[in-house]
Image (spheres, rainbow, N blue to C red):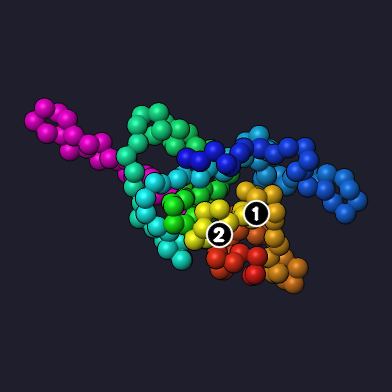
């Protein structure tokens, strides 16, 4: 995990309307103190240009506990990021399924495997992990052109982003 993403917002970051008054969050919006935007950082490996990757890392008990806690918070915020030295990808996420397996040996020992599968949409892909964040993570939002030109009313979890390498261009 990296520590550069923080939960919640400062008073200064509360969005205001054209009248200068704070914008009230929608009924489904989380309060700022419940927003969690974890970035799971891996020491080796790469993120492909389309956001694909296959990364793994050995972790100790404390690190695994922190990752699981952050993942639980991210499920409420619908936001997870994965980073390697050679790339970064941010996702809008939802629950898909969970699987567990255990095949013990004669001493009743083995690996308890837990697989969590999330439905994910790549929102932002960069070959440079230091590239400035956009959207909720960076405090710089962008509006889909369809929000201005169509009657469509739902633009949740950045599902409207067609090109995560250039999310503001859609």
Q: Which mark is residue 135?
A: 1
Q: Which mark is residue 124?
A: 2
34 with respect to 57 (left or right): right
Q: Please, what is the dominant secondary structure of the magenta stretch?
A: strand
- Residues 114 and 70: in front is 70
Indicate the secondary structure of the residue bearing disc 2: strand
9 with respect to 16 (left or right): left
- Residues 66 and 126: in front is 126
Q: Is residue 142 above or below residue 80?
A: below
Indicate the secondary structure of the residue bearing disc 1: loop
Q: Is residue 148 above or below residue 108?
A: below
Q: Residue at x 64, y 70 (%)?
A: 170
Circle nearer the N terminus (1, 2) = 2
Q: Residue at x 39, y 34 (%)?
A: 64
In the rendered image, residue 77, in percent from the top left (x then y), is placed at 58, 44
Q: Residue at x 88, y 54 (%)?
A: 18
> Label 1 vs label 2: CA separation?
9 Å
In the rendered image, residue 108, in percent from the top left (x then y), is placed at 14, 28
Q: Disc 1 vs disc 2: Cβ atoms closer than 8 Å? A: yes
Write the start and end of the magenta stretch as one range. Answer: 96-120
Q: Residue at x 18, y 34 (%)?
A: 110
Q: Was residue 107 drawn as part of the magenta stretch in this picture?
A: yes
């Amino acid at each position: 995990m990296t520590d550069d993403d923080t939960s919640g917002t400062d008073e200064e970051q509360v969005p205001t309307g054209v009248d200068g008054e704070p914008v009230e969050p929608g009924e489904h919006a989380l309060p700022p103190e419940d927003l969690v935007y974890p970035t799971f950082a891996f020491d080796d490996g790469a993120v492909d240009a389309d956001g694909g990757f296959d990364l793994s890392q050995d972790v100790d008990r404390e690190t695994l506990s922190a990752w699981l806690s952050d993942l639980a918070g991210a499920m409420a915020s619908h936001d997870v990021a994965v980073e390697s030295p050679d790339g970064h990808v941010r996702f809008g996420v939802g629950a898909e399924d969970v699987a567990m397996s255990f095949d013990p040996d004669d001493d009743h020992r083995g690996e308890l495997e837990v697989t969590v599968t999330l439905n994910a949409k790549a929102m932002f892909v960069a070959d440079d992990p230091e590239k400035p964040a956009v959207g909720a993570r960076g405090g710089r939002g962008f509006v889909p052109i369809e929000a201005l030109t169509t009657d469509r009313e739902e633009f949740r979890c950045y599902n409207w982003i067609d090109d995560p390498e250039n999310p503001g261009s859609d």
